[in-house]
């Protein structure tokens, strides 16, 4: 079985494809034949050795995937060999031909979705759902700014917000990304690479400001976010790559709330509730992951360069 292995932290080239021993499922576990693995920014942070949670070396990267159940342990009840599933976490890492998971880490993959789409669900849709509903408590009729909407989490949030009846202002940094946002149903698409783009928010909201901001790059935007949120606005910090200067006074005049979020904090039960809540949307087609670039497993280093680069366009996946 081939897997990507990291034996030392560092740049993308530390990821090497290797032959590793086959996996065996114990009680309550399954071996998944990985058809596609999702590439998330957190995979790159972990590989670089600079993530807030330490990882033991050597390891196989990857949190998300989709595939087919290949083998089950004796006390495994919910899944059988041949089932189409998506993976939201694993015991062995998902950048591999096979992954070992507990039953709680996998969910049925709706027939309407491809494996590549299934690999785009775990972290992105889980994060978007939590940000929008658990943290910001979004309601139909409210306006959300998805600040960084052309990537995995942002597009998931866009689809979730539209299907829940919100008005969506979404941002991207390329013409192609902006086109995608409009195609996916954004009411307004703004270019975050242009100076002064946030001044449009006043007109769009007729001076009220936005109710919710889902922020993908807080170290750049949080200070300005505080100026464009409306009364009782909720700002959810999803992505942040460094410190930022803000004026806390900006939170006072409109009773703003800044909320942090990490998918790593979810209990198994909380996670199950999130993914079960998404099921109906996938079945009805209101939620349909957008897959962008696809790389063969051995090109994991190039996939990490891409996920950390500019010009996001949907989900990046690896094909074993
Ligand atoms: P992604 O697919 O790489 O997308 C990155 C997004 O950020 C793109 O839409 C990109 O737009 C946008 N962006 C770039 N420059 C920006 C700017 N100046 N202002 C606003 N947005 C900007 O990554 P992702 O999977 O969607 O994740 C987004 C962020 O959330 C990452 O930092 C990730 O680490 C974090 N995250 C956190 C959690 C958590 O548990 N807290 C979970 C998942 C993800 P363009 O490329 O079009 O410029």
Image: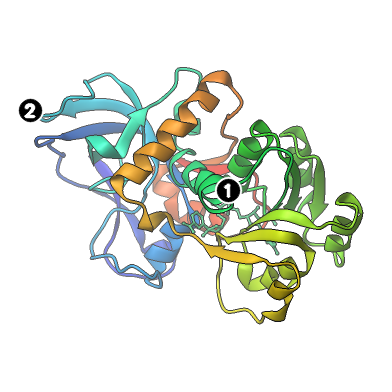
Task: Report ligand 1 position as a quadrant.
Answer: bottom right
Q: Report whether 179 appears left or right of 252.
A: right
Nearer the observer, 133 or 8: 133
The first of marks 1 and 2 along the sequence is 2
Residue 244, image x, y percentages: 63, 79
Residue 251, x across and y down, in percent: 69, 72
Based on the displayed image, in which of its 4 quarters is residue 96 positioned? top left
Question: Dot 1, crowdedness within 10 Å: few (<14), some or many (≥20)?
Answer: few
- Coordinates of residue 38 in the picture (x, y in percent): 45, 43
> What is the secondary structure assignment of the residue under circle 1?
loop
For marks 1 and 2, give the CA distance: 41 Å
Give the colour scheme shown: rainbow
**Helix, strand or loop for disc 2:** loop
The image shows residue 118, relative to residue 299, as above or below, that is: above
| Left or right: where 198 falls relative to 160 | right
Q: Can residue 301 be seen in this view?
A: yes
Residue shown at 31%/35% (left/top)?
106
Q: Depth-wise, is mark 1 or mark 2 nearer the camera?
A: 1
Looking at the image, is 244 positioned above or below residue 45?
below
Kindly identify which residue carries mark 2: 74
Q: Which residue is disc 1 drawn over?
A: 137
Rendered position, 260 above or below 250: above
| Image quadrant assignment for residue 109 | top left
């Amino acid at each position: 079985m081939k897997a990507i292995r990291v034996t030392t932290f560092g740049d993308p080239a530390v990821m090497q494809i290797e032959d590793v021993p086959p996996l065996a499922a114990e009680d309550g576990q399954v071996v998944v034949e990985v058809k596609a693995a999702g590439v998330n920014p957190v995979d790159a942070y972990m590989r670089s050795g600079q993530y807030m949670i330490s990882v033991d070396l050597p390891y196989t990267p990857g949190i998300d995937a989709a595939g087919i159940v290949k083998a089950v342990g004796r006390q495994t009840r919910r899944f059988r060999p041949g089932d189409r599933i998506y993976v939201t976490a694993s015991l062995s890492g998902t950048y591999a031909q096979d992954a070992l998971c507990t039953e709680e880490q996998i969910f049925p993959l709706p027939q309407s979705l491809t494996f590549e789409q299934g690999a785009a669900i775990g972290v992105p849709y889980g994060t978007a759902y939590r940000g929008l509903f658990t943290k910001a408590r979004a309601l139909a009729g409210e306006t959300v700014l998805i600040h960084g909407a052309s990537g995995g989490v942002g597009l998931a949030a866009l689809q979730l917000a539209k299907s829940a009846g919100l008005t969506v202002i979404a941002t991207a940094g390329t013409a192609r990304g902006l086109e995608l946002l409009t195609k996916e149903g954004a009411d307004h698409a703004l270019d975050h690479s242009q100076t002064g783009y946030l001044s449009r928010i006043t007109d769009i909201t007729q001076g009220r400001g936005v109710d919710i901001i889902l922020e993908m790059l807080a170290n750049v935007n949080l200070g300005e976010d505080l100026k464009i949120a409306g009364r009782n606005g909720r700002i959810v910090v999803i992505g942040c790559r460094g410190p930022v200067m803000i004026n806390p006074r900006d939170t006072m005049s409109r009773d703003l709330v800044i909320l942090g979020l990490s998918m790593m904090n979810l209990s198994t039960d909380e996670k199950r509730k999130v993914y079960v809540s998404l099921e109906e949307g996938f079945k009805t087609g209101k939620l349909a992951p957008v897959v962008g670039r696809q790389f063969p497993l051995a090109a994991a280093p190039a996939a990490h360069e891409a996920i950390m680069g500019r010009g996001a366009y949907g989900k990046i996946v690896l094909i074993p």
